[in-house]
Amino acid sequence: MNPRFWFLPALATAGMSFSAFASTEQPESERTFYLGADWAAYNDVKLESGGVSISENSDFGDLGFNLVAGYEFNTHKVVKLGVEAEYRSFSEVNYEDVLKVEGSGFYINIKPKFIVQYDEADVYVSLLAGVGNMDIDAKAEGVSASESEASYQFGAELGFIINRNVDLHLGYRSAHVEVDNIDASVNTAYLGARYFF
């Protein structure tokens, strides 16, 4: 097992500990299953190999998106634990018109959510850790290559619970993968919404 994934079992254990001490009585108004989408407002791709690194941002309008489906456990009135499946599109990054890289990924995430309650709307901070698979396509001087490798990501969100059904948020995620001795990372700032059923 890759030592970089050590934090996921630790986070899962913490989540189970929250559940173990939570009340078994859940209010009828609590939310559980949700769907959501995010739009990347900033996307930076960094490639590193042998001490040399290059970094480039996606063009505006071609920044990528995330789609998620998840389930939120009601561990406490102000602490929730979400488990979600996520598809990420990282869009295309052009390195000096020589190298073009684009990618996508599928992740399973764990998201503890810490809520501060106010009269008009509740505010929350959510952490995220996930493992999955990243697909990368690269083109350089007429030659193209594709790779698919195990990947991990982490991040955080600041959100607003508008009503029983809708959350709005802004966040940051960093996804990492190693392909043929090249370390690639995709750092994304995004805006999004979740709809709870």
Image (cartoon, helix red, strand yellow):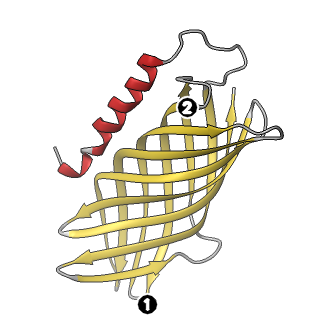
The C terminus: image quadrant: top right
The residue tagged 1 is 96
Q: Residues within 10 Å of mark 1 (few under 14, many from 20)?
A: few
Q: Residue furthest right?
A: 120
Asked if residue 3 lies left or right of residue 16, the reply is left
Position of residue 171 measured from the top left corner of the image (x, y, whole percent): 57, 56
Asked if residue 21 lies left or right of residue 50, the reply is right
Asked if residue 91 lies left or right of residue 108, the reply is right
Residue 78 vs residue 33, the one in the foreground: 78
Q: Report how many numbered discs are placed on residues in the image.
A: 2
Residue found at x 24% / y 44%: 6
Position of residue 141 measured from the top left corner of the image (x, y, whole percent): 34, 86
Residue 195 vs residue 78, the one in the foreground: 78
Asked if residue 194 lies left or right of residue 105, the reply is right
Residue found at x 37% / y 32%: 14
Circle 1: element type: loop
Q: CA distance from mark 2 to mark 1?
A: 46 Å
Q: Residues within 10 Å of mark 2 (few under 14, many from 20)?
A: many
Amino acid type shown at disc 2: Val
Q: Residue furthest top?
A: 25
Residue found at x 54% / y 33%: 70
The N terminus: image quadrant: top left
Residue found at x 51% / y 33%: 82
Amino acid type shown at disc 1: Glu
Cβ atoms at labels 2 and 1 below 8 Å apart: no
Circle 2: element type: strand
The residue tagged 2 is 79
Position of residue 132 measured from the top left corner of the image (x, y, whole percent): 35, 45
